[in-house]
Amino acid sequence: MESQLIYLSDLNFNLDVWKRELKFQDDEMDYFEEKLEHIAIRNPGSEVMIQLEGFQNKIIREREVMGHLRHRIRMKKRELVQSKFENNAEVLFQEKQVMLKDEMATFVKMHYQLKEKMMDFFLKYL
């Protein structure tokens, strides 16, 4: 029983870290949107505005994915709380945790790819 509680605590720690990661990336997107607005105010022409609009659409999509991941994290935390006193939950949680871990890894990779493209765009137009 004690080892299961430690295991569940470790899983909860992972969820908290991922939740913080999503918060950081969401704050970063706020900052990037602000910079995109600065570029748009300058009326840079249609080619730049098309790129700018593409970045805005990607930010919207990224926020949708962040919302989905936050929801998954909340549900996982609820499951952990409910299972503290149940037996043999480890295998089920491990499988779900690995799936969520893979989703987070994919999201983080995609986020940083978008971030690099946006930073190049900012260097060019800010």
Image (spheres, rainbow, N blue to C red):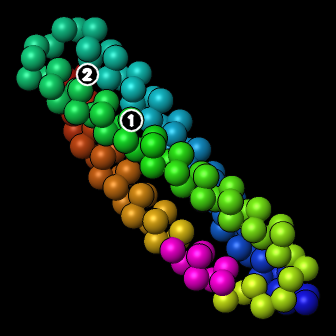
Front residue (pair 7, 90): 90
Residue at 66% in and 84% down: 92
Q: Is residue 49 left or right of residue 17?
A: left
Residue drawn at the location 49% of the way across and 63% of the way down: 104
Closer to the camera: disc 2 or disc 1?
A: 1
Our reading of the magenta stretch's main secondary structure is helix
- Residue 125 painted magenta: no
Q: Residues within 10 Å of mark 1 (few under 14, many from 20)?
A: few
Q: Which residues are magenta?
A: 92-99
- Residue 70, given in percent of the width and then of the height, sits at 59, 51
Task: Please report the residue visible at 67 percent of the width from the left and 79 percent of the height from the top.
Answer: 93
Vertical relation: 83 (above or below) 70: below
Residue indicated by mark 2: 126
Q: Earlier in the sequence, mark 2 or mark 1?
A: 1
**Quadrant occupied by the N terminus:** bottom right
Tell me which amino acid carries mark 2: Leu
Above or below for 26 versus 92: above
Task: Name the residue tied to disc 1.
Answer: 60
